[in-house]
């Protein structure tokens, strides 16, 4: 019994740790900032690199490169410090929305100059051959030792201390989560969960066949919302819900009346960025379809109903998304297919099938 309890406890703890692990770019950014504050610079570097690879917003990526360089600077890794500061400047050079202030550019260029000097000194030191070797008895002669090497153990060249103004100069240290205006970078969001949401409003036309009755093309509308989960820099999946509404007008006894189809589904989607700003999205929804307002209508062959008729519903759609801004998306849905097995009472039985073509606008954060 104790063994079973222990196993259950381990599984619960493991599940909790997996749930708490960083998942999005913003999660990794906050993890990197925390590790940097605690002085765990290697862990901060790993976290910022993970965040960079998952960050879908190109305008925020320079922030990660700057913070990676800052963390390498703290570890006295001159070569990587130089590389990531240069990559930061290269990325900011194409940022027309928030260009780097001249003061901040000068500061980064000074860091680059210091790191470049450090790299050259380390290279020279590593390439300098030893003057002589230490014999097994530990006693060596001064033969072959230059005047500059006197005072040092036999076989050891004079050691050079790192430059006083090295890469880790504390006076110029900038925290990764410092004020964005002062740092010259766009800081990633650090609000609590959920960190990102996606919502879109769509509308267009729909062709519906209800049982044996074909409904003329009608206006249709929908709302789709969810929580995006980045898989890699190009692929994002989303879990959420979808709602659709399509009117179904009909005439009975010489009077124009209107029924309606209401869809409510759990929705899963995947978006793949084909080129910058343009992505292809696939949606799959599963839930319920409600056919309302059809009492004594042609859809029921004039028979009364006890209310709206509910049935199982599945919907699949393909769309193209264009990111006008990092937060605003325009979407075009050339094809969406809906299917529901007809509820008892629908004329002709069979199924209710819809074909939709829609456009819309989306917001994500």
Image (cartoon, rainbow, N blue to C red):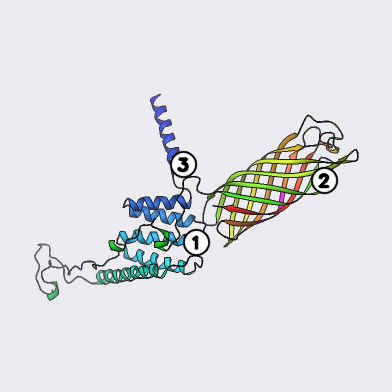
Whichever of callouts 1 and 2 sits on the residue coming sooner in the sequence is 1
User: Which quadrant of the structure image shows residue 48?
Assistant: bottom left
Identify which residue is drawn at 56% across, 56% down. 327
Q: Nearer the viewer, residue 211 or 5?
A: 211
Which residue is at the front of the view, 127 or 309? 309
Please report contact status of discs 1 and 2: CB closer than 8 Å, yes or no. Answer: no
Magenta stretch secondary structure, dominant: strand
Residue 167's image quarter? bottom left
**Mark 1 or mark 3, which has the lower sequence index?**
3
Secondary structure, mark 1, is: helix
CB atoms at circles 3 and 2 under 8 Å apart?
no
Q: Quadrant of the N terminus?
A: top left
Q: Position of residue 242 (x, y in %)?
A: 65, 44
Q: Which residues are magenta?
A: 331-336
**Residue 19, numbered circle:** 3
Horizontal side, residue 255 vs residue 306: left or right: right
Q: Provide the residue designation for mark 2.
A: 215
Circle 3: element type: helix
User: Is residue 350 on the magenta stretch?
Assistant: no
Q: Give residue 59's mark.
A: 1
Taking the magenta stretch, the answer to whether it contains residue 334 is: yes
Taking 333 as reference, is 167 left or right? left
Report x, y in % for residue 39: 31, 52
- C-alpha separation, residue under disc 3 versus residue under disc 2: 47 Å
Instruction: State the residue at coordinates (48%, 65%).
Output: 98
- For the point 83% across and 30% down, the residue is 304
Q: Earlier in the sequence, mark 3 or mark 2?
A: 3
Q: Position of residue 181 (x, y in %)?
A: 42, 61
**Residue that sits furthest to the top in the current view:** 1
Rounded to the nearest angstrom, the CA distance separating label 1 from label 3 is 28 Å
C-alpha separation, residue under disc 1 versus residue under disc 2: 47 Å
**Depth-wise, is mark 1 or mark 3 nearer the camera?**
1
């Amino acid at each position: 019994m104790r063994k079973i309890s222990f196993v259950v406890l381990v599984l619960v703890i493991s599940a909790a740790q997996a749930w708490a692990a960083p998942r999005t770019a913003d999660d990794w950014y906050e993890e990197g900032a925390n590790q940097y504050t605690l002085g765990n610079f290697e862990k901060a570097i790993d976290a910022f690199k993970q965040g960079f690879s998952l960050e879908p917003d190109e305008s925020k990526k320079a922030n990660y490169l700057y913070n990676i360089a800052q963390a390498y600077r703290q570890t006295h890794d001159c070569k990587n410090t130089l590389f990531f500061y240069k990559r930061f400047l290269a990325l900011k050079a194409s940022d027309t929305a928030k260009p780097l202030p001249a003061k901040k550019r000068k500061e980064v260029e000074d860091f680059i100059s210091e790191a470049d000097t450090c790299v050259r000194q380390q290279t020279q030191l590593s390439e300098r051959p030893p003057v002589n070797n230490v014999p097994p008895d530990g006693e060596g002669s001064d033969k072959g030792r230059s005047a500059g090497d006197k005072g040092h153990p036999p076989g050891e060249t004079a050691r050079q201390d790192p430059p006083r103004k090295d890469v880790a100069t504390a006076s110029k240290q900038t925290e990764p989560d410092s004020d964005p205006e002062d740092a010259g970078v766009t800081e990633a969001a650090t609000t609590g969960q959920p960190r990102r949401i996606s919502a879109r409003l769509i509308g267009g036309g729909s062709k519906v066949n209800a049982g044996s009755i074909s409904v003329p093309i009608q206006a249709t509308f929908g709302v789709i919302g969810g929580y995006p989960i980045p898989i890699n820099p190009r692929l994002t999946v989303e879990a959420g819900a979808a709602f659709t509404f399509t009117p179904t007008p009909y005439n009975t006894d010489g009077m124009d009346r209107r029924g309606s189809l209401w869809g409510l589904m759990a929705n899963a989607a995947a978006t793949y960025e084909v080129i910058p700003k343009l992505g292809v999205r696939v949606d799959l929804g599963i839930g319920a379809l409600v056919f309302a307002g059809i009492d004594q209508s042609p859809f029921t062959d004039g028979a009364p109903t006890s209310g709206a008729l509910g049935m199982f519903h599945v919907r699949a759609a393909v769309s193209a998304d264009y990111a006008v801004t990092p937060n605003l998306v325009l979407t075009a849905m050339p094809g969406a297919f809906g299917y529901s097995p007809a509820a008892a009472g629908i004329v002709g039985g069979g199924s209710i099938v819809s074909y939709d073509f829609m456009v819309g606008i989306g917001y994500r954060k």
